[in-house]
Amino acid sequence: MAEATNEAKTVGWGRAILTTAMIAVVGVALLVYAPNAVLTHVHSINRSGRVGVATAVFVVGIGVLARGLRWLQSRNML
């Protein structure tokens, strides 16, 4: 019977830097630019409606980012 090994995969510096940069770019896009785009480009609803939609986009962005990071972590990509 094969023995289970518990070897941790090591991540090189290049991959770590690239992964960090990509996470930062996606995070800024989801959490800064998307809500800002809602606030500045949606004119069909009043201001409080836009704020509500921008807040929802921000909260959903946090959830998507957390879920994506957890997915990457479960596949040993982080």
Image (spheres, rainbow, N blue to C red):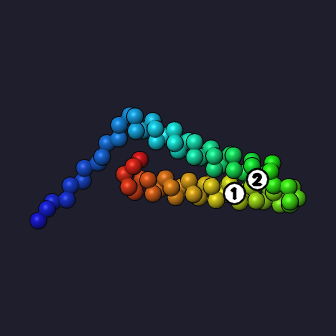
**Alpha carbons under labels 2 and 1: distance apart:** 8 Å
Query: Which residue is outermost to the left?
Result: 1
Image disc number at residue 21: none
User: Could you tell me which secondary element the residue under label 1 belongs to?
Assistant: helix
Badge 1 amino acid = Val
Toward the viewer: 43 or 46? Answer: 43
Residue density around tag 1, few if under 14, some if 14–19, many if 20 or more, within 10 Å: some
Is tag 2's residue or tag 1's residue first in the polypeptide sequence? Answer: 2
Locate residue 52 relative to residue 11 in the image: left or right. Answer: right
Query: Which residue is outermost to the bottom?
Result: 1
Dot in front, 2 or 1: 2
Q: Which residue is mark 2?
A: 38
Taking the spot 86% from the left edge, 60% from the top edge, the residue there is 45
Residue 38 in picture, x, y percent from top left: 76, 53
Q: Are marks 2 and 1 in contact (CB under 8 Å)?
A: yes
Looking at the image, is 1 positioned above or below residue 68?
A: below
Q: Which residue is mark 1?
A: 57
Residue 50 in picture, x, y percent from top left: 81, 57
Q: Quadrant of residue 44?
A: bottom right
Badge 2 amino acid = Val
Residue 59 in picture, x, y percent from top left: 66, 57
- Quadrant location of the N terminus in the rendered image: bottom left
Residue density around tag 2, few if under 14, some if 14–19, many if 20 or more, within 10 Å: some
Taking the spot 14% from the left edge, 62% from the top edge, the residue there is 2
Taking the spot 80% from the left edge, 51% from the top edge, the residue there is 41
Locate residue 1 relative to residue 38 in the image: left or right. Answer: left
Taking the spot 69% from the left edge, 57% from the top edge, the residue there is 57
User: Could you tell me which secondary element the residue under label 2 belongs to?
Assistant: helix
